Amino acid sequence: MATFEIYRRSTIGMLLTEILDEMVSSCTLSPELAIQVLVQFDKSMTEALGSQVKDRITIKGHLHTYRFCDHVWTFILQDALVKKGLSQAKVNRMKIVACDSQLLVP
């Protein structure tokens, strides 16, 4: 099973990683268990976003770069317009990372 570590760059993911590193360094937690916790974190985030987020947004912009590697799409947009309902925002540069969530959830 592939894990995509995309949620680990979020604030909560970085804090979790930092705490686990400290616990492994102090021999409170084994490295194997720390890895299992991170993998479970990725699965939980994927499941929560898939089941609890119901809003839809529209993104339009100039596609600067795209890449597909290891079942992960990465898009870089310039001058993007993001719309949700009646609100909208302009973004100079936006990075979108997308992967198949079915590869994470058993």
Image (cartoon, helix red, strand yellow):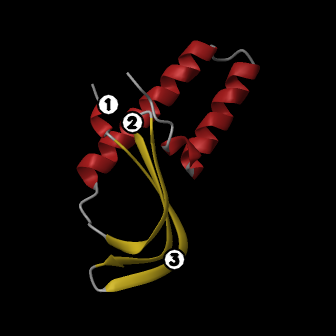
Residue assigned mark 3: 91
Q: CA distance from mark 3 to mark 2?
A: 26 Å
Compared to residue 62, the image places residue 98 above or below, namely: above
Residue assigned mark 1: 103
- The amino acid pointed to by label 3 is Val
Sequence-first tag of 3 and 2 = 2
Q: Who is closer to the viewer here, 23 or 69?
A: 69
Residue assigned mark 2: 71
Compared to residue 83, the image places residue 2 above or below, namely: above
Q: Who is closer to the viewer here, 3 or 32?
A: 3
Q: CA distance from mark 1 to mark 2?
A: 9 Å
SS at badge 1? helix
Of the 4 image quadrants, the one containing the C terminus is top left
Sequence-first tag of 1 and 3 = 3
Rendered image quadrant of residue 83: bottom left
Residue at 63%, 17% (x, y): give it.
29
Residue at 27%, 53% (x, y): give it.
52
Q: Is residue 22 left or right of residue 30?
A: right
Q: Who is closer to the viewer here, 47 or 81?
A: 81
Residue at 46%, 27% (x, y): give it.
39
Residue at 48%, 82% (x, y): give it.
90
SS at badge 3? strand
Tag 1–tag 2 contact (CB < 8 Å)? yes
Tag 3–tag 2 contact (CB < 8 Å)? no
Q: Is residue 87 left or right of residue 3?
A: left
Q: Position of residue 92 (x, y in %)?
A: 56, 76
- The amino acid pointed to by label 2 is His
